[in-house]
Amino acid sequence: AKGNGRDTVRFFDPVMQAAVDERMALEKALRQALQGGELSLYYQPQVDRAGHCIGAEALLRWHRPKHGSIAPSAFIPVAEETGLILPIGRWVLEAACAQLKAWAGDPETRDLQLAVNVSARQFYQPDFVAEVQAILANSGANPTRLKLELTESIVLEQTEIVIERMQALRALGVSFSMDDFGTGYSSLSYLKRLPLEQLKIDKSFVQDISTDPNDAAIVQAILAMSHSLGLMVIAEGVETPEQQAFLLAHGCDAFQGYLFGRPVAIENWITTHDT
Ligand code: C2E
Ligand code: CA
Ligand code: CA
Ligand code: CA
């Protein structure tokens, strides 16, 4: 029994070796992807209670020649482990800010807010605030249109540093949303200490909202608590009118999901969302 654990870790395991090889190949390909322009941003609309588009979430896509499209869940973990998330994250911020600048030139789109996902490793770089500031300045984007989505794993790690950085970015006009809310440690005490504008209910709760009383109760509680703390709430993964109706009835402020639009390349954004 005791020896079994050791026996399974062999010096050379062909299955493990294949996994290691595949990962290294993926890392190499990802490094080239960044330089070769294979990465792009897709934009998914966010709407208010009246159904008007108020902004978008920028979602990373990797179109790999001869392999097709690769889901973020397949390459973002690799990017995080290898540190490639740093240049990739910078590229995402630059592309997002360039898009904000382009939107600013059109009265139809100039008020849109763009939400950008930030990974823990990216946020904890010592010069993250300076980097965001430089990207905003170089792009000419309005900082008040940029919203950074942070996860619970980021804010629970080193709360003091996190608050300091968030405040520095807030001073520039940038706002913050707490992503995937409810899936992490669910310690609510830290919420009121963070300079957050918005909280995003994870799609795993939204999915069964109309059938699972527990999920319905959790979502109701999140909405009530957030509003008493003065936070806006957006629900992600809204796919059905029933889910939207439940969320509307309980005061949810904004919505994102296939019901309103899938993530699309920017050239498809104009036709689907111009009013
Ligand atoms: P996330 O931040 O929670 O993003 C929401 C995910 O839900 C996206 O998956 C989106 O396409 C998907 N989604 C949107 N509406 C619906 C819906 O109605 N139903 C369902 N079932 N799904 C919906 P996606 O684009 O595959 O991204 C997966 C994750 O990858 C993101 O989860 C985020 O954690 C990460 N990610 C994406 N882009 C970036 C990025 O630029 N930087 C970093 N660090 N992470 C990113
Ligand atoms: Ca997100
Ligand atoms: Ca999520
Ligand atoms: Ca996520």
Image (spheres, rainbow, N blue to C red):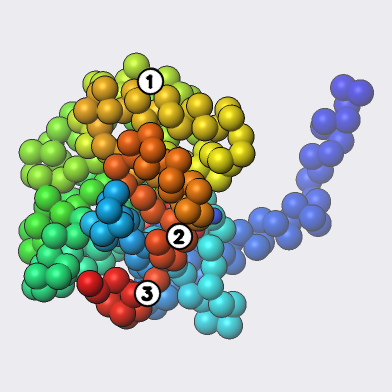
Q: Secondary structure at mark 3?
A: strand
Cα separation between marks 2 and 1? 29 Å
Q: 125 or 197: which is nearer to us?
A: 197
Residue 265 is marked as 3
Instruction: State yes or no: Cβ of the residue under disc 2 lies below 8 Å from any atom of ligand 1.
Output: yes
x, y percent for residue 228:
26, 22
Q: Residue at x 84, y 39 (%)?
A: 8
Q: In the rendered image, which quarter contains the N terminus? A: top right
Residue denoted by label 1: 188
All told, the count of numbered labels is: 3
Instruction: State yes or no: Cβ of the residue under disc 1 lies below 8 Å from any atom of ligand 3.
Output: no
Q: Is residue 271 above or below residue 81?
A: below
Q: Secondary structure at mark 1?
A: loop
Residue denoted by label 2: 259
Q: Residue at x 78, y 45 (%)?
A: 11
Location of residue 105 by image quarter:
bottom left
Q: Is residue 4 above or below residue 24?
A: above
Q: 80 or 96: which is nearer to us?
A: 96
Q: 120 or 47: which is nearer to us?
A: 47
Q: Is residue 225 above or below residue 242?
A: above
- Of circles 3 and 2, the one toward us is 2
What's under tag 1, amino acid-wise?
Leu
Q: Residue at x 43, y 29 (%)?
A: 220
Cα separation between marks 3 and 1? 36 Å
What's under tag 3, amino acid-wise?
Ala
The answer to whether one can see residue 120 in this image is no
Location of residue 266 by image quarter:
bottom left
Q: Residues within 10 Å of mark 3 (few under 14, many from 20)?
A: some
The answer to whether one can see residue 26 in this image is yes
Q: 2 or 220: which is nearer to us?
A: 220
